[in-house]
Image: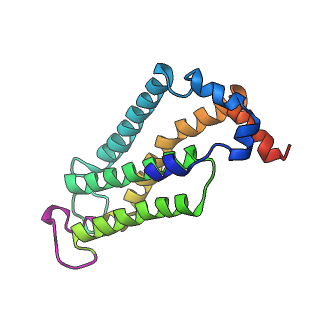
């Protein structure tokens, strides 16, 4: 997330110097005010509710989602929730990014890769040695179950859909000066 904040540019330096109106938006606090901050907090709360409660209701209370016939436990549900948190945060960061470079692509890939390495290590999927007994076998059960894949797909899609809709509405019906400049750049004007 830090890489995105440091390296992303809304427009290149040449354009930002030629369109000084872009700086007035910051002085008027259009991107950081109580309304915008409240919207981000509500969106984060929505994400938290979706990525927790959908897997919880679909997978807990003795539900069986794997062919081995074992009932799901809190550790498997927690692993799915943790995966969804990583997924939704990365998708949100990607949707906020205007210039996608090799560094941002690497950061996204590394984030997902590190989750797999960490989970594989803790559950013993890679080493055969169990580091955390509660997580033993969760990686195999998680990725080996079509039901869990569907829960993850549905939860991830449901979590990021409002963000996509809000951004599309804003760009089409309430564009800022930044959006108008970005559109001119894309059209080559």
State which region is magenta: 126-139
Residue 102 position in % (x across, y down): 57, 63
Q: Where 121 sits versus 31, above or below?
A: below
Q: Residue furthest bottom?
A: 128
Q: Where 177 sits versus 89, above or below?
A: above
Q: Quadrant of the C terminus?
A: top right
Q: Residue at x 37, y 44 (%)?
A: 51
**Left or right: where 88 falls relative to 172:** left
Quarter of image, res 101? bottom right
Residue 128 position in % (x across, y down): 21, 79
What predominant SS class does the magenta segment belong to? loop
| Residue 184 lies in the magenta-colored region | no
Q: Residue furthest front?
A: 17
Q: Where 188 sits versus 149, above or below?
A: above
Name the colouring of the figure: rainbow
Q: Residue at x 61, y 35 (%)?
A: 167
Q: Where 187 sits versus 34, above or below?
A: below
Residue 38 position in % (x across, y down): 44, 24
Q: Residue at x 32, y 52 (%)?
A: 82
Q: Residue at x 34, y 47 (%)?
A: 55
Between 66 and 99, the residue placed more toward the observer is 99
Residue 73 visible in this rendered orientation of the protein: no
Residue 80 visible in this rendered orientation of the protein: yes
Q: Residue furthest right?
A: 189
| Residue 130 lies in the magenta-colored region | yes
Between 80 and 21, the residue placed more toward the observer is 21
């Amino acid at each position: 997330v830090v890489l995105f904040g440091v390296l992303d540019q809304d427009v290149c330096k040449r354009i930002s110097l030629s369109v000084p109106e872009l700086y007035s938006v910051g002085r008027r606090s259009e991107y950081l005010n109580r309304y915008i901050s409240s919207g981000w907090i509500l969106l984060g709360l929505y994400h938290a509710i979706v990525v927790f409660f959908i897997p919880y209701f679909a997978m807990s209370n003795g539900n069986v989602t794997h062919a081995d016939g074992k009932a799901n436990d809190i550790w498997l549900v927690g692993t799915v929730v943790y995966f969804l948190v990583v997924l939704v945060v990365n998708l949100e960061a990607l949707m906020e990014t205007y210039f996608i470079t090799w560094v941002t692509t690497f950061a996204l890939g590394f984030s997902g890769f590190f989750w797999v390495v960490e989970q594989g290590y803790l559950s013993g999927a890679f080493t055969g040695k169990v580091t955390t007994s509660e997580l033993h076998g969760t990686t195999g059960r998680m990725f080996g179950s079509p039901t869990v894949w569907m829960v993850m797909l549905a939860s991830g899609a449901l979590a990021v859909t409002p963000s996509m809709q809000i951004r599309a509405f804003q760009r089409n019906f309430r564009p800022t000066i930044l959006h108008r400049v970005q559109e001119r750049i894309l059209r080559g004007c």
